Amino acid sequence: MSSINSASPVVVMFDPSKGSLTNRAQCAKEHFKNNLNYNVQLGLAGAAGGIAIAKKPKFLVKAATKIGEITSKLISKLGGKGMAAKIMKNPTKFGKYGMIAAAGLWVLSKIQNHAYKSGQIDQKYTDSAAIEQQTKNVVLDYYVK
């Protein structure tokens, strides 16, 4: 069960696949940190974008171009050569729609990163619970015989 919503720390506490209460609490803590990081990044980017649009539109063009270059490198490393890569390489070339597309692609990359990290957290603690269960069975079997 991959939990990428903001309630995931609470959901994890009631997930029996995460094993012991300690393991579930650690998993919930990791989900909370992941959610906090994601929400802070998107919140700060939104606030900065709003202020930049209101105060210094030229700064926003420079920032969007820089974000576009970074994201373009990431897309090309992943094998993307299509329109998204072209937009992200130089969003100002496509006018205001390019800027909107660049912002949208950046947000999508953040959502994807958050979901990927959430899946990694879930898998780590599901595996840990399985090991915990196997170890408990081995120890109990040893003492029972």
Image (cartoon, grey):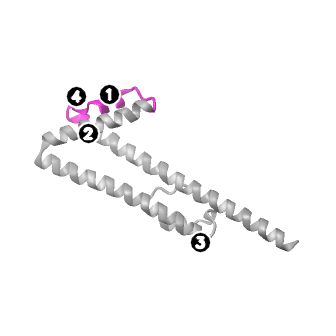
Q: Residue at x 35, y 57 (%)?
A: 39
Q: Residue at x 16, y 51 (%)?
A: 51
Q: Alpha-carbon distance for marks 3 and 2?
A: 44 Å
Q: Is residue 73 above or below residue 37?
A: above
Say whether residue 6 is visible.
no
- Relative placement, left or right, of 109 versus 58 is right
Q: Alpha-carbon distance for marks 3 and 4?
A: 53 Å
Regarding mark 4 in the picture, which secondary structure is present there? helix
Percent x, y of residue 101: 29, 37
Q: Magenta segment range?
A: 78-101
Q: Alpha-carbon distance for marks 1 and 3?
A: 48 Å
Q: Is residue 124 above or below residue 95?
A: below
**Image marks 4 and 2: residues in contact by CB distance under 8 Å:** no
What residue is disc 2 on?
Answer: 100
- Relative placement, left or right, of 141 versus 83 is right
Say whether residue 96 is visible.
yes
| Mark closest to the chain's N terminus, 3 or 4 | 3
The N terminus - image quarter: bottom right
Regarding mark 3 in the picture, which secondary structure is present there? helix
Q: Alpha-carbon distance for marks 1 and 2?
A: 14 Å
> Which numbered circle lies on residue 21?
3
In the displayed image of the protein, which residue is found farthest to the left? 55
